[in-house]
Amino acid sequence: MILLAHIGDYWFVPAPLESHHWFGAGFLFVGVLLVAESLAGGVWFRSRLRAAIWPAGAMFMGEGLIVVAALDPAGRVIHFSVGLLVLVAGWLELRYRLGLASRFSTDVVVVPALLGSGFEMGVIHAHGAMMAAASHVALGLTATGMAGVRVLQARNPSSFALYLSMGLLVITLALILLVFDPGG
Amino acid sequence: MPIRTRALIIGLAGPATQAAGITWEALHLATAHLDIALTPRHIAFEPGFLVILVGFLVSLVCVPLAIEVARATPEDVALPQLGAVPERHDRIEPDRRGIFGGAE
């Protein structure tokens, strides 16, 4: 972390807009796979490796946000705390999918993590130019929508529509990061 | 939704994403790069190229999955109940049964 804090100006370190594109690509990958997961149903979960892609992807992006917090002094606390929340939520989702944790114990952390990330991104971090602020509000609303879908899924875990909605919300998150400029 | 339709959508997810990325990048190059040279940094970070890469990775996962789904039954594609199942304590353990199978 100390090393990362000192290499922020080197050519190989992505600029804020460029790292947003990478995160957008990461969310697009897991979002499309979540849609495929909802269509494949039980066939998807025949492979434990496939079942682990979504939570592992979330954990990878959470770690990425923590690295961004070390590299970029702007919004360091926001990036670090959201990264930590995403990392923990991904780890719990992985345990849930592998049958090591119950839905309730996972949601007790995942839903507040999504709401917390949404509040930090959509309210605290929503500043700068008009388009940047609007993009952050859209990111916050999408994360809040994901928390809502997650709560509804607890009541009906086998609902195809809710599964599909979660995938589409993650794709929305990706498109906000890829198309708009939340860092600008 | 019919199994064949599910398999078709899953199989086309990767190529469709790649097609979107190619269209995106073609439009970007036509509008913003007529006079500016394309650099390796541009390829590594521009959304169009990244979407093409994502489409390729999605294809790696989804094409074998589509074949599996096409061979599955409607029961197989139902969404399963995930997570740990709470232990039940209301059953009699096998080693505590009597010699004729009844409870001690």
Image: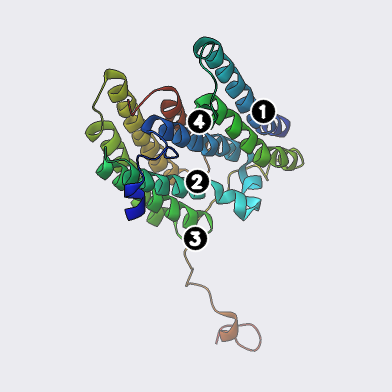
Amino acid at pointer 1: Pro
* Residue A138, position as x, y percentages in the image: 34, 26
> Answer yes or no: do the residues labelled 1 and 4 have beta carbons within 8 Å?
no
Q: Which disc number belongs to residue A147?
A: none
Name the residue that disc number 4 marks: B41
Circle 1 marks a residue in which chain?
B
Q: Which SS class for mark 1? A: helix
**Between marks 3 and 4 in the image, the one whose residue lies nearer the viewer:** 4
| Front residue of A150 and B95 | A150
Q: Which SS class for mark 2? A: helix
Q: Same subunit under labels 3 and 4? A: yes
| Front residue of A91 and B26 | B26
> Answer yes or no: do the residues labelled 4 and 2 have beta carbons within 8 Å?
no
Image-quadrant location for residue B13: top right
Label 3: how many Cα within 10 Å (few below 14, some 14–19, many 20+):
some
* Residue B94, position as x, y percentages in the image: 60, 80
Amino acid at pointer 3: Ala
Name the residue that disc number 2 marks: A57
Name the residue that disc number 1 marks: B15
The residue that appears at 44% across and 58% down in the rendered structure is A102
Quarter occupied by the N terminus of chain A: bottom left
In primary-sequence order, the first of circles 3 and 4 is: 4
Circle 3 marks a residue in which chain?
B
Label 2: how many Cα within 10 Å (few below 14, some 14–19, many 20+):
some
The residue that appears at 40% across and 37% down in the rendered structure is A146
* Residue B62, position as x, y percentages in the image: 66, 38
Amino acid at pointer 4: Arg
Amino acid at pointer 2: Gly
Name the residue that disc number 3 marks: B84
Circle 2 marks a residue in which chain?
A
